[in-house]
Structure formats: structure tokens, C-alpha cells
Amino acid sequence: MSGPGLLAIYTEGGHVRGLGHVARCSAYARGWLDRGGRVIWTLDGDDLAGAAATGCGEVRPGRWQDDPAALPDLHPAVAIVDSYQLTPAVAAAIADRAVMPVFIDDLQALAYPRGLVIHPALDPAPLRPDGADWLTGPVWQPLRPAFWTLAPRGPVRPAIDRILVTMGGSDLYGPGAAIVRLVADRVPGVRIDWVTASDVLSPPPGVVLHHRLSDQAMAGLMLEADLAISAAGSTVFELARCGVPAILLGVADNQQPNLDHWPDRCGFIDAGLWDAVDRDARVRAALDRLCDPHLRASITDRAMATVDGQGVRRLFERLQTRDGKGGS
């Protein structure tokens, strides 16, 4: 590529679908803007998704995933596509119009046309050949700018002092409140930083509420946390980058690969699905295990070795080479 040019982003999100796609696309957008390029979003989302994309380029709302005729008349240098609802016809239409199409993939649900596929999940990929070049593994996950370069993480504390609870950008099903109460009962006296999209009028003692945090604020909370209880979505990569021992709850079907693979990779604990009958028992058992500072220290080291925060840089360096070919 001869210059930054136009980056077109096609994605989705909101209260029901969460903000994972928007968050990682915003990482690419902010990096592209920093390089002097222009960014246009085509966003199928509600006000929550629109707010998350604010400041990251021009946002044009509308559904686009299943109708090539609904695509804007853009011919960008790079198109980034991040959607669980993408159809083959639209994928092909975007690839035809962009100099370099880039597809973000978690579930290997589609055979992609020409271009690059970013598959940051821990499972092997691709399962079948297609027209794209696959870039795989968690080092390719696009993290937001605050996670590119971090302040040093402090030493592991002998006793748990701070616990971070976050059930995703929208906390659609509302398990956060029950988890917070469970933590306050199981680990009395601990400070609980609860990141929630809900308004809570009277949180329990020791609970500090946080709403719509910037990436800098979220990174700061993670670096101070002794452990986290989190939805098993894209936040897992940020927790790993910050070295936070994590108890993971699945709140969507597409999070199952994270529950399956992160425990073996770095010791994060799979607490099952958010609505499982044994959820509370599994969370309590995980909290008891993580009281061991040696275990927490081991998880911290393994997690930080898995995610280095340079996924955005890696993609842009790859795009600098001819036709997206070349070393990572």
C-alpha cells in the first residue's frame, strides 16, 4: 500500500449482541487514524454500539450483512469485516471492492474469499481451505490502544485485595449483580470493582461501580485487580494482556471456544455458563483456588506470555507488504 487511504469497517453490536466486535474494530480504527488515514464505519447497531464507535471515524448506521446492494459505494484501501451474521455473497462483494479485505473470524463459520482472515482464537484454524490467507492465534487479537503499551504490573499480593467483575459491555442477562453478591459473601472485606452497563442505586458495601469506561480506565482496573470474574468474550484477551487471573462465565454461544481453550493455555478457570444450575458453586470453588498466591502468579506469567497487545501493529505491518503478503 502506498499510503493509509480509506479504511472501511463493517460490523455490528449493541445491547443484545454486545460490544466485542465494535471494541476490536475501534482498535484498528484508532490505529489507522493515528497514521493519518480516514475511517468509515457501516454499523448495524443501536445507540450503545454507536457510542462505542464515537471518535473512531465516520459512523453510518444500517444493516448490511445479507444484501450486497445495501453496501455503501466505497472502494477502500482496506476493508475490515467483523460479523457473526456475514453472508458469503456480502463477503464476496466487499472483497471485490477493497484493495485488501480483512475478515475477523472466531468460529470458522464461513469459507472466505480472497484477503486476510484474523482468527485470534486458541483453536486450530482453518478447518477447511478457502480463498484467504489465515493469520491465527491470540497475538493477532486487536486490543484497544491502552493495551498496546502497559505500565508494569505490581507483584502478586499474598491475599486477595481487589476483584474485578465484568459481564461484558452490555451485561445483557444481568448476572453481574448475583456474582457481586456471591463475591462479597465469599471473600469478605475485599474491594469489588464492578464494571456494569446497569444503574445500581444501592451497591453492597465495598463495591465500586464503573460505567462505560475508557480503555485507559479499564486497563488501570485490570492492572490493580488480583483476579477477575468475567464474561468469556473479547475481554479475555485484555485480561490476559494485563496478567489478571480470571474466572470465566459464558454468556453467549460464541464464547464456548474461550471456555474450552483458555484454561489449558494459561490457567484461567472455566466456571461454565452464566445460567447453569451449578454456576455459584463453580465460582465459589474457583475463588477458593485463586486464594493461593502461587497459583495466581503462575497464571499471570502464562497469560502475559500469550497476549502481547500488538495485534493491530501486526496487521498494519502485514498490510504494508505487497498485497498483504510477507512476514508477520
Image: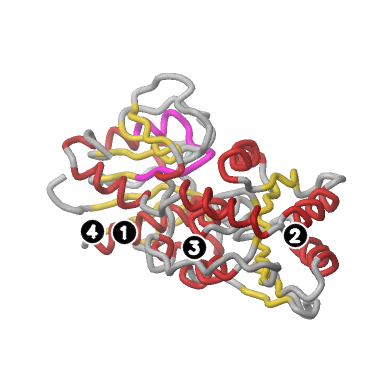
Q: Which mark is residue 174?
A: 2
The residue shown at (27%, 45%) is 78
Indicate the position of residue 25 as horizontal and vertical percent values.
Answer: 42, 53
The region drawn magenta spans 80-93
Q: Give how far apart the Cα atoms at labels 2 and 1 are.
A: 33 Å
Q: Kindly report which numbered mark, 4 or 3, lies closer to the viewer in this rendering.
A: 4
| Residue picked out by circle 4 | 37
Image quadrant holding the C terminus, namely top left
Q: Nearer the viewer, residue 276 or 50?
A: 276
Q: Are marks 4 and 1 in contact (CB under 8 Å)?
A: no
Residue at far left of view: 2
Q: Quadrant of residue 287?
A: bottom right
Indicate the position of residue 36 as horizontal and vertical percent values.
Answer: 21, 62
The residue shown at (38%, 43%) is 71
Q: How is the image coloured?
A: secondary structure
Q: Give how far apart the Cα atoms at labels 4 and 3 are.
A: 20 Å
